[in-house]
Image: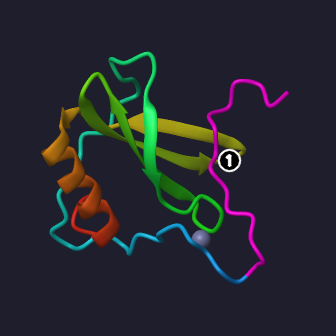
Amino acid sequence: MAGHAPSRPRNRGSGSGCLSPHPPPPAVDAVRLDWRASVQFDRCRVAAWTCAEHLRVWYELCRAGGLVFLRRTHQRGGHLVVTYSEAWVERRGVEMWAGVLSGRVR
Ligand SMILES: [Zn+2]
């Protein structure tokens, strides 16, 4: 059993290829999201994610209750620290996700 650790998407491939995006470092003027320790939804569906194999911080696009929010996981010591963005309507949430992938949002 893996215990209660959050799920960690992985890419088990041939080694060199990585199909998940690697977000660039945030832009100097990147939008800073308000990352919170909890979210108002008990369950969500993860629709997209960044690479969790090569980077120490990764992001997931989650859908719940008709809204979209982002989940950020990072390794700190031997622990995984999970935080969440606020929840947006679909279009806004997808914009934020695109911003994370391009370094404009973090
Ligand atoms: Zn990778």
Is residue 45 something that shows in the picture? yes
Left of 10 or right of it: where is 22?
Answer: left
Report whether the residue tagged 1 is closer than 8 Å to ligand 1: no
Q: Quadrant of residue 99?
A: bottom left
Q: Residue furthest bottom?
A: 16
Q: Quadrant of the N terminus?
A: top right
Q: Quadrant of the C terminus?
A: bottom left
Q: Is residue 87 magenta?
A: no
Count the marks.
1
- The residue tagged with tag 1: helix, strand or loop? loop
Location of residue 44 in the rendering, given as x and y in whole percent from the top left corner: 43, 28
Q: Residue furthest right?
A: 1
What residue is drawn where x is 37% and y is 73%? Answer: 25
Q: Please, what is the three-letter code of the amino acid marked with disc 1? A: Gly
Residue that label 1 marks: 77
Dot 1 surroundings within 10 Å: few (below 14), some, or many (20 or more)? few
Location of residue 9 in the rendering, given as x and y in whole percent from the top left corner: 62, 50
Compared with 77, 3 (above or below) is above
What is the chief secondary structure element of the magenta stretch? loop
Which residue is at the front of the view, 14 or 37? 14
Compared with 94, 43 (above or below) is above
The span shown in magenta is: 1-15
Q: Is residue 9 magenta?
A: yes
